Amino acid sequence: MNDDISIRAWYKAEKVMLTVSEIDFRRKRIKAMKDKLYSLRFDEVEMMPKICVNSNGINVYDEDIIIASYGERIWGEYEYTDTFTVHYNDLISIALLYDAVIYEVIGNSYEGRGVS
């Protein structure tokens, strides 16, 4: 199991998702990467902590859009499937995520579907 702390950040001005490499709480700044190194103030980004890693090694972060399947497999299909957004401080969405038989990240609240 991978228990490292991982945070990504949505840079509002450029509308790009970044991987956070450093957080300076005293100066209220982060350093993050995409195609280049960014040094940004907290108010310039929306930070999203990693919530868990699925069985395929896919990280699930706050604000990710998930498609999840539940129940027994009947004729190759699960009993029911649901799509929802995971929120770090919402116990219901976390419970839905952990209760799923299988799930996949299909996007996030900032970039939309299909760009996980």
Image: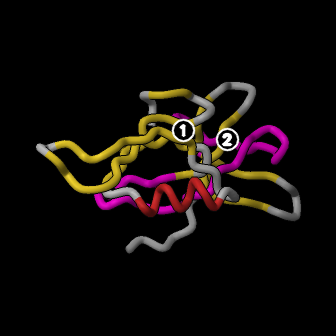
Looking at the rendering, in which quadrant would you find the C terminus? top left
Amino acid on which the number 2 mark rests in the picture:
Tyr
Q: Where on the picture, by quarter, is residue 16?
A: top right
Q: Residue at x 61, y 42 (%)?
A: 37
Magenta stretch secondary structure, dominant: strand
Q: Which span is picked out in magenta?
A: 33-60
Q: Residue at x 54, y 38 (%)?
A: 34
**Circle 2 Cα neighbour tier, 10 Å, few/some/many (<14 / 14–19 / ≥20):** some
Q: Nearer the viewer, residue 76 or 67?
A: 76
Q: Position of residue 79 (x, y in %)?
A: 29, 47
**Secondary-structure class at tag 1:** loop
Say whether marks 2 and 1 touch (CB < 8 Å).
Answer: yes
Q: Nearer the viewer, residue 107 or 22?
A: 107
Residue bearing the label numbered 2? 38
- Up-down relation of residue 7 to residue 3 (above or below): above
- Up-down relation of residue 25 to residue 105 (above or below): below
> Is residue 78 rendered magenta in the image?
no
Q: Residue at x 57, y 53 (%)?
A: 93
Residue bearing the label numbered 1? 34
Amino acid on which the number 1 mark rests in the picture:
Lys
Q: Position of residue 62 (x, y in %)?
A: 60, 50
Q: Position of residue 99 (x, y in %)?
A: 42, 62
**Secondary-structure class at tag 2:** strand
- Up-down relation of residue 102 to residue 63 (above or below): below
98 sits left or right of 109 in the view: left
11 sits left or right of 80 in the view: right
Q: Which mark is residue 93?
A: none
22 sits left or right of 65 in the view: right
> Is residue 34 rendered magenta in the image?
yes
Q: Position of residue 80 (x, y in %)?
A: 34, 44
**Circle 1 Cα neighbour tier, 10 Å, few/some/many (<14 / 14–19 / ≥20):** few
